[in-house]
Every structure is written in C-alpha cells, then in structure tokens.
Amino acid sequence: MNIGIIDCGGANLNSIYYSFKRININAFISDSPSELDGMDAYILPGVGSAGIVMNKLKENNLINLIKETKKPTLGICIGMQILFEYSEEDNTQCLGLINGDVKKFQSDSNIKVPQMGWNKVISDTDSLNGYYYFANSYYTDSNDYAIGHSYYGKKFNSIVKKDNFLGCQFHPEKSSDIGEKFIKNFINTI
C-alpha cells in the first residue's frame, strides 16, 4: 500500500510522513500529478492558508487529480477546509467537493484565535470519540456531511465524510495514540 501525501505548500509534511512510517505504511510526498497517480490513497496535509494551498494546487495541476479521484482521500485541517466551496481565509474559492463555507472564529474574552490544543471530538461512531490536537483559526459548520463535531465557543465540524473524501479539522499526526488510531481507521478503508 502506498499513500500519496500531496505537497500543497503546508508545513507539516514530515510529521504526517512519519506518522505513516511509524505504522509501517509506505508514504510518499510529492506535488507531481504523474508521481501521485499511482498511489492507493491521498493525504491533503494541514498547515497553511487557504489561498496559498489552492494556488499551489493550481500551479502544480493537482486540482483535477483531487476532484476526479475515487481513491480514499484524507484532508487534515486546511486540507479538510479546502474540500468545501469557499473560505473566508484569503477570500478563497476552494475545491467545492463539499457544500458549505469556511469561516473565521471570532476572538473574545473566552475564545482565543487560533484554537491551539486538545479538544473533544463527539461522533456517532464511538471509535472516533476522544480528545485530539487542534490548531485552527477557521471552521465550518454548514454541511450535511459532518460525522463528528467539537465546541470552541460554538459547535463546529471536526470530522466530515463525503464519498471517498474524509476530512478532520484536528491533526491526527499530533494526537498521540488516538490520532494513530484515526489514521489506522483511514487505512482500513483502502
């Protein structure tokens, strides 16, 4: 099994790569459609901004590969957010694979932006419930595909699933044992 980690300008490529290496899964980082074409599944990594990520995907002709794939694809943090139609971050048109917009958390006396740290994920799927590590200033709450949610001043989607696309707002690669379990669950769908 080979996992293609799509290099879309994010900063956490190596931590994702090593999270697969720890569980003896071959992973490959690339921004080349021809190199990625032969992979069994894809990861859209999760550190960066919507505008930079979408521009990098366009520059490297990766938009069609992602939009047309039937292979399991996991979007992490910004990788999940770009699955939606639009992000307030950089006023960005995203991939449009899932209906809804991505909005910015509003800072106040109780809410610091970005959200940094552990937060609880509540899902109908018991195996996904638990505390995961989040690092996000943006969120989505407007879709029919949420399978997990969290609270940070308001309820927001922490896991979404549509067809072969799975998205998580948290960072499983930084979420210790439960994050590894989440990655293994994803691998089991391949």
Image (cartoon, grey):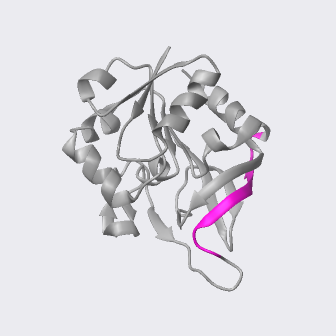
Q: Residue at x 69, y 86 (%)?
A: 109
Q: Is residue 99 visible?
A: yes
Type of secondary structure dominating the magenta stretch: strand
**Which of the 4 image quadrants contains residue 7?**
top left
Left or right placement of residue 131 versus residue 63 in this view: right
Q: Which residues are magenta?
A: 112-125
Q: Is residue 188 visible?
A: no
The quadrant in which the C terminus is found is top right
Residue 172 or residue 69, whichever sits in front: 172
* Residue 60 x %, y %: 22, 39
Q: Residue at x 64, y 75 (%)?
A: 112
Query: Is 118 a magenta residue?
Result: yes
Q: Residue at x 32, y 63 (%)?
A: 92
Q: Residue at x 60, y 30 (%)?
A: 19
Residue 169 or residue 123, whichever sits in front: 169
Left or right placement of residue 146 versus residue 110 in this view: left
